């Protein structure tokens, strides 16, 4: 019975560690994608402002 319990404990620890790694990975990729999205949005806004000022100068 103790061998089965040790195997179960080890499996649970491996599963829990996997969930932790997955959580860290997903948090990092989500944060990176939010940063990229904000940077893209900022670049689009800047391009629109420059485009409108160029059109006004003509």
Image (cartoon, rainbow, N blue to C red):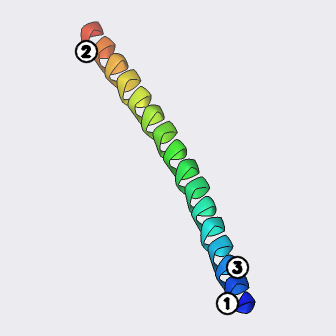
The residue tagged 1 is 4
Q: Name the residue located 39 percent from the left edge and 31 percent from the top edge.
A: 41
The answer to whether mark 3 and mark 1 are in CB contact below 8 A is no
Residue 11 sits in quarter: bottom right
Q: Name the residue located 70 percent from the left edge and 79 percent from the top edge.
A: 10
User: Mark 1 or mark 3, which is nearer the start of the sequence?
Assistant: 1
Q: Position of residue 23 (x, y in %)?
A: 56, 56
Secondary structure state at the residue bearing disc 3: helix
Residue 7 sits in quarter: bottom right
The residue tagged 3 is 10
Residue 46 sits in quarter: top left
Q: Is residue 23 left or right of residue 50?
A: right
Q: Residues within 10 Å of mark 3 (few under 14, many from 20)?
A: few
Q: Is residue 7 left or right of residue 28?
A: right
The residue tagged 2 is 55
Secondary structure state at the residue bearing disc 1: helix
Nearest to the eye among marks 3 and 2: give it.
3
Q: Name the residue located 63 percent from the left edge and 62 percent from the top edge.
A: 21
**Closest to the observer, 48 or 5:** 5
Gap between marks 3 and 1 measured at Cα: 10 Å
Residue 14 has which mark? none
**Closest to the observer, 37 or 22:** 22
Nearest to the eye among marks 3 and 1: give it.
1
Gap between marks 3 and 2 measured at Cα: 67 Å
Nearest to the eye among marks 2 and 1: give it.
1
Q: Is residue 44 left or right of residue 19?
A: left
| Quarter of the picture holding the N terminus | bottom right
Q: Position of residue 56 (x, y in %)?
A: 26, 8
Above or below residue 20? Residue 51 is: above
């Amino acid at each position: 019975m103790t061998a089965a319990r040790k195997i179960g404990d080890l499996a649970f620890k491996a599963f829990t560690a996997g969930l932790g790694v997955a959580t860290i990975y997903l948090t990092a990729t989500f944060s990176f994608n939010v940063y990229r999205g904000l940077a893209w949005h900022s670049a689009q806004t800047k391009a629109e402002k420059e485009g409108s000022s160029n059109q006004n100068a003509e």
